[in-house]
Image (cartoon, rainbow, N blue to C red):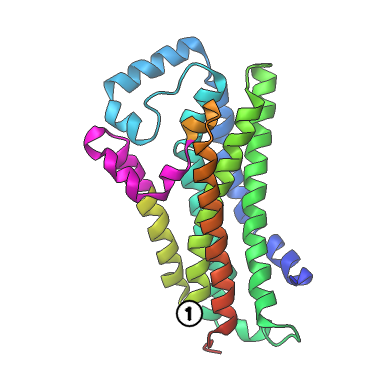
Amino acid sequence: MIRVILYRREIKANFILFLIFAGVLTMYSVMIVMMFDPKLGDSLRMMSESMPEIFAAFGMADVGTTLLEFVAGYLYGMLFVAFPGVFIIILAGRLVAKYVDNGSMVYLLTVPKKRWSFVLTQAAVLVTYIALMVIYVTGLILITSHILFPDEMEIKEFFNLNIGLFGLLVFFAGVCFFPSCLCNDSKRATGIGAGVIIYSILMQMIAQVGEKFENLRLITPLTLFQIDNFLIGKQEAWVGCGILYVVGILFIVAGIVIFHRRDLPI
């Protein structure tokens, strides 16, 4: 079982960090929804044609004509991947490796509870904040869309897209939480998680530039987050989404097991 007191303390301690990233996502979300205008869309398409490689790298080469396609292209192609990714990198490093690194782990483990309950609690905090972030941006975009463009948003497909986004962020959480449980040095743990996320994003950006680099899609997990297939309701999107969920959860579980069994420098 999780430690309720520790869980509440960690939620409170990291709430300001969450608010900072939520504020950034709020700004971009509202701005992009407000930009959904046929006339402005024509201008953006002209810009895309003048700088095709740059727009393609950020997943904005073809943003479609519907509100859902517009939001998916400008937010979910890169912004809703990169900013939550940075949030996860920072938070995962704070939750485990930082305590080992600064020597405060000895105090946390002196309570009469098993070690695994501590790391399970920290994993719960990480997943909670990821869920809150996805729920927040989902609600924000739906409310903003309803106010500005009533009945324009395809709600079912939009919810499916956010389920896929949550799966991708769970994967990011796993690859960041695992080294945080494995390493004694918080900088090394953060560096490993950051390296995986940055590598994934860069490979995806390069793969989207043109057919010459298209095969790079095969070596980045972001390929499993199939935005286009979610928008048209293809089953392949759920297969990729399921793989992200499973791999992310396995990394989190492996981190908990390793932390419970390994020797700590305390």
8 in magenta: no
Disc 1 is placed on an element classified as: loop
Give the magenta-colored segment's residue range.
Answer: 201-226
Instruction: Tell which of 5 and 14 is nearer to you.
Output: 5
In percent of width and height, residue 109 lies at: 67, 84
Q: Residues within 10 Å of mark 1 (few under 14, many from 20)?
A: many
Q: Residue furthest right?
A: 4
Vertical comparison of 169 with 205: above or below = below
Instruction: Tell which of 14 and 206 is nearer to you.
Output: 206
Name the image quarter holding residue 45. Answer: top left
Vertical comparison of 190 with 79: above or below = below
Q: Is residue 87 visible?
A: no
Residue located at (65% from left, 54% from top):
129
Name the image quarter holding residue 15. Answer: bottom right
209 in magenta: yes
User: Residue 107 vs residue 248: left or right?
Assistant: right
Q: Is residue 42 visible?
A: yes
In percent of width and height, residue 232 lies at: 53, 26
In percent of width and height, residue 49 lies at: 30, 19
**Prevailing secondary structure class for the magenta stretch in the rendered image:** helix
Residue located at (51% from left, 24% from top):
69
For the C terminus, give its image quadrant: bottom right
In percent of width and height, residue 74 lies at: 47, 30
Instruction: Tell which of 180 and 90 is nearer to you.
Output: 180
Vertical comparison of 54 with 13: above or below = above
Give the residue at mark 1.
184
Residue located at (45% from left, 77% from top):
185
